[in-house]
Image (cartoon, rainbow, N blue to C red):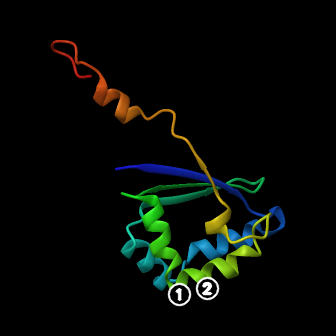
Amino acid sequence: MPRYCFVAHVRTDRLDEYRRRHATVWPDMLRALRDTEWRNYSIFLGDDGLLVGYVEADDLDRAQAAMAATEVNDRWQREMAELFADGGRPDETWRLLDEVFNLDDQLAALTPEPGKDP
């Protein structure tokens, strides 16, 4: 399953609001994410406003396009935009990071020593 990580920046004066809104995401938004094949989706937020997101999807471009086509995503993104440092729609301004290491992938690639787990 392909893994994706992205970063963005939340306004430091709006961190509490960002956390509050994500404590109880709209049920329609949660269902839309699930239905558009976003899996194992997590967001992390630092006190300096650095936001790091992680998601698994068979095809991130397809999953993003499917979400962009939903009415609930349009409402959510418009409401969340005011909380971000750049003021843009969060789903259009995040920056994807390249994965450079994954423990499970590297362990799976090891040739096991006789009598030992990889």
> From the viewer's perspective, is residue 56 above or below residue 89?
above
Q: What distance separates the C-alpha of mark 1 from that of mark 2?
A: 6 Å
Pick the residue in front: 82 or 58: 58
Task: Tell me, for residue 105, which label it has, or none.
Answer: none
Pick the residue in front: 112 or 60: 60
Badge 1 vs badge 2, beta-carbon distance below 8 Å: yes
Res 56 → quadrant: bottom left
Circle 2 — which element? Answer: helix
> From the viewer's perspective, is residue 3 above or below residue 108?
below
Q: In this view, does 32 lie to the left or right of 68?
A: left
Q: How crowded is mark 2: few (under 14 residues within 10 Å), some or many (20 or more)?
A: few
Kindly identify the amino acid type of the residue bearing the numbered disc 1.
Glu
Task: Tell me, for residue 75, which label it has, or none.
Answer: 2
- What residue is shown at x 40% (from left), y 72% (from top)? 36
Q: Mark 1 points at which residue?
A: 71
- What residue is shown at x 72% (from left), y 74% (from top)? 81
* Residue 17 place in picture, x, y as percent: 73, 73
Kindly identify the amino acid type of the residue bearing the numbered disc 2.
Arg
Q: Can you say which quadrant of the picture contains the C terminus?
A: top left
- What residue is shown at x 36% (from left), y 57% (from top)? 58
* Residue 10 place in picture, x, y as percent: 74, 62
* Residue 28 place in picture, x, y as percent: 47, 85
Which residue lies most toward the left here? 115
